[in-house]
Image: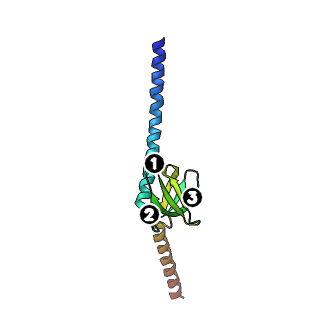
Amino acid sequence: MLTKILASMMIYIVAASASVLPIAAQTNAADNKIKMDVTRRGTGEKARVVVKTKAGASIKGNINRAGDDSFDLINSKTKQSQTIAYSDVEKVKKAGWSTAAKIGLGVAIGGAAALVLALLHFR
């Protein structure tokens, strides 16, 4: 009887620890991805980003410093430095328009100009 109880407890412990390890590994991998993204963007005025936190807030600013566990962001509205932990960040993206949006805007302006010129020519 005691053997069955000990065997059941061992099975439970192994199953419980196996289900916890992948979650911790996923969290660490997500933090490393955010850290690499912040490091890749660099620091200073050209490192303008929009940070979306896991709490749902979006913060625009420049990366001032990138550390091991967190990074400093200078808020573009308040000009105050704010330390943000990598584990609190859901997403970091470049501030401003994407390259595809810029190309689309250029094509739209060019098409509108061509349409205006064609209408003026055939009038």
At label 3, counting other C-alpha atoms closer than 10 Å, the crowd grade (few under 14, some 14-19, many 20 or more) is: some
Look at 45% across and 18% down and name the residue there: 7
- Which numbered dot is residue 58? 3
Numbered disc 3: secondary structure: strand
Kindly report which numbered mark, 2 or 3, lies closer to the viewer in this rendering: 2
* Cα–Cα gap, marks 2 and 3: 19 Å
Query: Three-letter amino acid code at disc 3?
Result: Ser
Look at 48% across and 21% down and name the residue there: 9
Quadrant showing the C terminus: bottom right
* Cα–Cα gap, marks 2 and 1: 21 Å
Q: Nearer the viewer, residue 47 or 101?
A: 47
Look at 58% across and 53% down and name the residue there: 56
Residue 5 screen position, x and y as percent: 49, 16
Residue 105 screen position, x and y as percent: 50, 72
Mark 3 touches mark 1? (CB < 8 Å): no
Q: Which residue is mark 2?
A: 43
Mark 2 touches mark 1? (CB < 8 Å): no
Numbered disc 1: secondary structure: helix
Look at 43% across and 41% down and name the residue there: 25
Numbered disc 2: secondary structure: loop
Q: Nearer the viewer, residue 108 or 84?
A: 84
Figure check: 45 above or below 116: above
Q: Which residue is mark 1?
A: 30
